[in-house]
Image: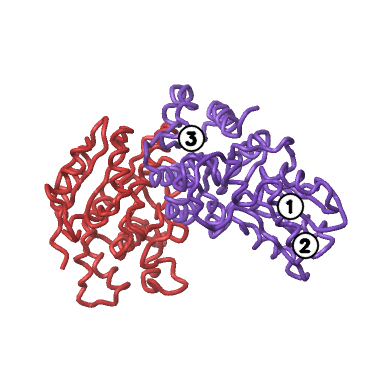
Chain colours: A purple, B red
Amino acid sequence: MTTMREAFARVTNELLDSEPRVAVVLADISTDRFARAARRHPDRVINVGIRESLLVSVAGGLALSGMRPIAHTYAPFLVERPFEQVKLDLVHQGVGAVLVSVGASYDSSGSGRTHHAPEDVALLDTLPDWTIHVPGHPDEAKALLRAAVAADGAVYLRLEETSNQTAYPDSQHLVVVRRGTGPTIVAVGPMLSRVLDATQDLDASVLYTSTIRPFDGATLRAIAATPEVILVEPTLAGTSVRVASEALRDRPMRILGLGVERRELRRYGEPWEHARAHGLDAAGIRTSIDAFLAS
Amino acid sequence: MTLPTPPPPPSAIPVPGYADLPALMARMTGDEKHDWAAASTLDVLWVLYDRILRVSPATVDDPDRDRFLLSKGHGPMAYYAVLAAKGFFPLDWLDAYATFASPLGNHPDRMLIPGVEISSGSLGHGLPLGVGVGLGLRAQGREARVVVLVGDAELDEGTNGEAIAFARAAGLDHLTVVVIDNRSSTHGWPGGIASRFAVEGWAAREVDGRDHGALESAFRETHPDRPTAIVAVTEEKR
């Protein structure tokens, strides 16, 4: 199957051909996927070298000149290292860009902590007016990228190696995947298949979304039949607890935020081993849900 | 038959000039001795807006206008005085400088002030942004210039190093950086600031930052394949 990263490269190549306002800014990552485009559009495929602060500033300058920039590299080097550039050279200048990351929380499991960014979304969430997509399938990533480039605002598209079995075309809202009478479980992005595996025999509603900012609080309110709400995210645990609790602020609720734990794991190996270590494989998710419901 | 006297044409209304800038700055500082008239950026800013930049209050949204990016955003009174003198915003804005509702703060905000191209204050952002603006204008086939003003101490910020190296690699010949050098960098620049740009392949030269004629000719001299750095030397910061 196509990966989300391949989907990103394919759609961005098409957009470079069809949309003269689109420019892609790279920092020595994924350049092989844009070699042909760079020959066709030398002024709109820009590789700044290993200069990630400049990567984001150049995106800001391109936007100031009237272009629609797509900036791309690994998540820690796109959001964390140049965070002040994101804050000042995009948001404070009043311009937008499409930031597309790969690597996610621990796709580069063997590379260690320097290449892991479970906190990227939580960090971006300290800034106003970002649209944040965590797609769960390459087809979702394609549609979300096209919509992001056609708009003008600030958009973060977080691509992961792991995908769900099924794409949901309406994933920018909360999609009701399964309806039950018990607790409400919200699976974000690539967590859905695991959540469904973990809760097959549980009388619960399972909702799915690829888009956590803005967060579809209205659907959560409409579906949440009991006080128990469980968020399962591929990012730092609790990343979306704030927006879920805001949506339900007039009700007595109990909210559990599952995700990547806030600790230094200091392990290499495979991504699934990291998921298991953080309790984010199907068994770990079920154990946490059972403990929460019994408490 | 006697015709009524017509109103004076607009050109007859006195327009503030260079000699009026100290008084305009005093409206912000309340300093009757005009100490701020010695602002290190004043002459460079005046020469740019009076003789070089193709931008006016009527063209602040024209995609083909020249762009001036004040990266060294602190001490912006000289910038505000020049913009006000050139009619980008009303002179009486100066009187409320840095108050809560004033568009004019201690650091400029492009969303609040007509003619201001970037919001600055945190050092080391203007040149990287200017590189992006230059790339964007080139991709659109526009001939506009991009001029970025930085301070010599601001060059301490490493983000400038990223931009200086890449701007030459990208051949941004419509980009000019003017460095106001009043020797305020704590650890200094052995070999001189111009050499830091020259070694990266920029056309770099040093001029007297108070000499309007020398500044004008430096700004008029651009090169077809490389960006330009002008080190405008002023008296040492006290």
Q: Residue at x 80, y 45 (%)?
A: A177
- Disc 2 crowd, CA 10 A, few/some/many (<14, 14-19, 20+): few
Q: Amino acid at mark 2?
A: Leu
Residue nearest the viewer, comparing A281 with A46: A281
Residue nearest the viewer, comparing A167 with A258: A258
- Does the rendering let one see residue B2? no
Q: Residue at x 55, y 51 (%)?
A: A118
Residue at label 3? A23
Please name which of the two marks, 3 or 1, marks the residue nearer to the observer.
1
Number of labelled discs?
3
Residue at label 2? A293
The answer to whether A232 appears left or right of B200 in the picture is right
* Dot placed on the residue nearer the N-terminal end, 2 or 3: 3
* Dot placed on the residue nearer the N-terminal end, 1 or 2: 1
Q: Position of residue A222 (x, y in %)?
A: 82, 58
Q: Position of residue A163 (x, y in %)?
A: 66, 37
Q: Position of residue B55 (x, y in %)?
A: 36, 47
Dot 1 and dot 2 residues touching (CB under 8 Å): no
Residue at label 1? A286
Mark 1 → mark 2, Cα distance in angstroms: 10 Å
Q: Residue at x 39, y 72 (%)?
A: B98
Please name which of the two marks, 2 or 3, marks the residue nearer to the observer.
2
Q: Chain of mark 3?
A: A
- Disc 1 crowd, CA 10 A, few/some/many (<14, 14-19, 20+): some
Q: Position of residue B156 (x, y in %)?
A: 25, 54
Looking at the picture, does residue B233 appear above or below residue B230?
below
Q: Quadrant of the N terminus of chain A?
A: top right
Q: Provide the secondary structure element on which disc 3 rests.
A: strand
Q: Chain of mark 2?
A: A
